Amino acid sequence: MPRGKFISKSEILDLLSAINPDSNISVYIQLENLIRFGIASGTLAPNDQLPPARDLADRLGINMNTVSKAYRDLVVMGLLTTKRGLGVFIKEGVVEQCREVSRKTVLRHFFEASAEAKISGFSADELRVILERIYANEVYPYGAIPSSIIPDVQ
Amino acid sequence: MPRGKFISKSEILDLLSAINPDSNISVYIQLENLIRFGIASGTLAPNDQLPPARDLADRLGINMNTVSKAYRDLVVMGLLTTKRGLGVFIKEGVVEQCREVSRKTVLRHFFEASAEAKISGFSADELRVILERIYANEVYPYGAIPSSIIPDVQ
């Protein structure tokens, strides 16, 4: 099906492999976020097919029910659609909605984290340096923090 | 008791009033964070007395058990101490530990939020502007976001 930007199945698997079972954010929430942020940024596009829950679960070393729950939630929210016998696809016409929801979720999270840093004594400069490094490197929000970005924090 | 920086009971109440029952972060976690960040930044100091759980619960309009749970957790973690018949106090010798734990918690949170913003399509400049505004204004991490900081996000 037509789309502006091609992404292979293996690239989608790579994108979704950025989840971290050891994070304090539930794995199904991480998956939902990665799919929503991927659509918002254009990395994922309408009509892209998601990997079968079993394949993704095997690749990530997590329970298949966790993947199914994330997919089911996103179907209920209207972002994904199931085509019987074919699999799970990103629905058409959801980009604007994803951008809007991601914007709110992400900015709320960024505000909270920056304000926590401020009241616990960090300077604006310290945060600016970390921000620069995050934009200069490849990052996975839920994974280990590379020591080139923040030393001594995992 | 001696301390470098005096803080009145009403100021402590003000600090802890920054919790937001509508946040998606549990109220007892917000309270624990505010106390830990307060100690890390020097706003709260060893031997400061915390408000009785009932007073704080009344002021915040929350259940007394929630406040008691936060106090109890922090006693178990060794940050607070109970003096029988007197109340709950910040323990001596905990500043370093609070700084260390806060640093990890806060930087992990900041990394996650910034990386989420990056992969969902925000530019580094957009985040830098928000960061500047957060440092130029009084902020409460778990409260509503002032529209002067981020318009249209609550």
Image (cartoon, coloured by chain):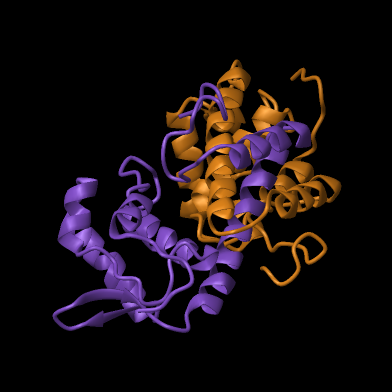
Chain colours: A orange, B purple
How far from the left and from the top, in percent, is residue B143? 41, 40
How far from the left and from the top, in percent, is residue B8? 33, 60
Question: Is residue B19 visible to us here?
Answer: yes
- Is A88 in front, or is B119? B119
Vertical position of residue A57 compared to residue A33: above or below: below
Left or right placement of residue A19 versus residue B90 in this view: right
Left or right placement of residue B43 versus residue B96 in this view: left
Question: Is residue A49 visible to us here?
Answer: no
Left or right placement of residue B12 versus residue A79 in this view: left
- Is B17 in front, or is B109? B17
How far from the left and from the top, in percent, is residue B106? 58, 59
Q: How many marks?
A: 0
- Which quadrant: the C terminus of chain A? bottom right
- Is A46 in front, or is B19? B19
Vertical position of residue A101 compared to residue B53: above or below: above
Quadrant of the rendered structure where residue A42 is?
Answer: top right
Vertical position of residue B106 compared to residue A82: above or below: below
What's the residue at 76%, 68% (across, down)? A151
